[in-house]
Image (spheres, helix red, strand yellow):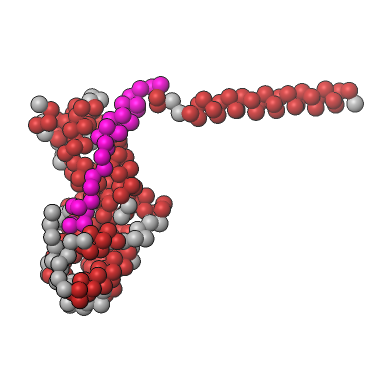
Amino acid sequence: MIETESDQELILEIQQGSLEALGVIYDRHRRLVYRTALAICNDNEAAADLLQDVFLRLYRFAKRVDPQRPLEPWLYRVTTNLTYTWVKRHHRWTRPLDDIAEWLAGNKKGSPQQIAEVDEELQRLRQAVSTLPLPQRIVVVLYYVNDLSLEEIAEILVIPEGTVKSRLHYGRLALKKHLRMGSETLPELQYEFT
Amino acid sequence: MDRFDLELRQALKSWVAHQPLPTSGRARLLRTAASQNNPADRTSPFQFVEIPNMLLTWAMVYSMEGRIGSLRSIS
């Protein structure tokens, strides 16, 4: 059963041109790639195209991938690089966190006043994230969405860990400043997970 | 990591987690990857369109030069 093979074995097969192995790797890692691209570019259609590009690159350049190393850092690196290029070309993310607001609007509970307050805060959060420079936004996404450590982010982006720390610090500071929260926190939100 | 971080993380993660993954992505990927294996499919339209255009351009240039040359020889 090829589905049970390790990434290492699958990479070796992809290096021999196996499309079946490529399909298995795609199924295994597509969430990671798609969600990372989407969180950075905030465009579902673009994220779907980037998802394709990442795995096509894996297929095309499989011989350059070291099967002895974990695949995920390679996938993160290619995803962030391609998404960075896409955002730079399209000057997008003009609707940052719109979908968060929409999704929460359909799932939150509370009084009308609480809902209105949450909407206002989400609007501010949306504007705050949109103001982050792209390098900071990428670090924020890898840190908050993908739960990666500073060391892992530094390895993926091929930058010093101090730079990651600095980007995260200033990104976080900018978010707080934009939200005018100082040491306060986001409003109490109630999520209804499906 | 304080409460702000936790809530920001929760909001971002909830959002991306609820975005549907593209359908038929695997089929599309394998189709494109397979076409890259096939030399016939890999041939760029550039080779079909641009090369005849280039030849045509050269033919026109030589033809015009020939005419100019013949006009000069007449005059």
The image shows residue A124 at horizontal and vertical percentages of: 28, 71
**Quadrant of residue A139 in the image?**
bottom left
| Of the pair A193 and A145, the residue shown nearer to us | A193
| Of the pair A5 and A61, the residue shown nearer to us | A5
Range drawn in magenta: B13-40
The image shows residue A5 at horizontal and vertical percentages of: 11, 31
Q: Residue at x 75, y 27 (%)?
A: B64
The image shows residue B21 at horizontal and vertical percentages of: 23, 45
For residue B59, above or below residue A150: above
For residue A137, above or below residue B61: below
In magenta stretch: residue B25:
yes
The image shows residue A71 at horizontal and vertical percentages of: 18, 40
For residue A60, above or below residue A94: above
Q: Dominant secondary structure of the magenta stretch?
A: helix
Residue A177 showing in the rendered view:
yes
Residue A174 showing in the rendered view:
no
For residue A156, above or below residue A120: above
**Quadrant of residue A144 in the image?**
bottom left
Q: Residue at x 34, y 60 (%)?
A: A95
Residue sitting farthest toward the front: A112
Quarter of the C terminus of chain B within the rendering: top right
| Of the pair B30 and A88, the residue shown nearer to us | B30
In magenta stretch: residue A26:
no
Q: Residue at x 37, y 60 (%)?
A: A94
Quarter of the N terminus of chain B within the rendering: bottom left
Tally the marks. Answer: 0
Q: Residue at x 20, y 52 (%)?
A: B18
